[in-house]
Amino acid sequence: MEIVTSWAAFSAQKTREEITLNLLREGMTTEAIVRVTGLTVEQVIQLQDQLTEDN
């Protein structure tokens, strides 16, 4: 059961990260993304940096 729970948590986190990247591309503010996704400010900034590096 623990493996299934870990996999579900991992999958949910990856989904939130993908949504965050899409919201950043659309120009949504960090604060709004934090409220919508439940990620921390630090996580959103890290994803924003990743997006900047990829471009």
Image (cartoon, rainbow, N blue to C red):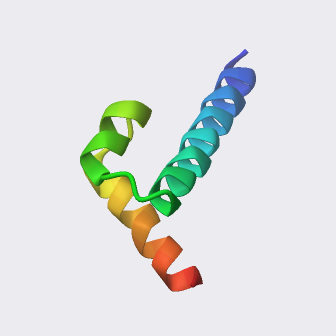
Up/down of 33 relative to 54, above or below: above
Left or right of 28? Residue 31 is: left
The vertical placement of 12 against 19, above or below, is above
Compared across the picture, whether 16 is left or right of 10 comes to: left
In percent of width and height, residue 7 lies at 71, 32
Q: With respect to residue 46, does 31 lie above or below?
A: above
Q: In which quarter of the view is residue 55 placed? A: bottom right
Q: Tell me which residue sits at (31%, 33%) in the image.
A: 35
Q: Residue at x 73, y 27 (%)?
A: 3
- Residue furthest out toward the top: 1
Residue 51's spot in the image, x, y percent? 51, 72
In this rendering, the count of numbered labels is: 0
The quarter of the rendered structure image containing the N terminus is top right
Q: Position of residue 37 (x, y in %)?
A: 43, 35
For the point 61% across and 33% down, which residue is it? 12
Q: Nearer the viewer, residue 13 or 19?
A: 19
| Residue 16 locus on image (x, y percent) | 55, 40
The image quadrant that residue 9 belongs to is top right
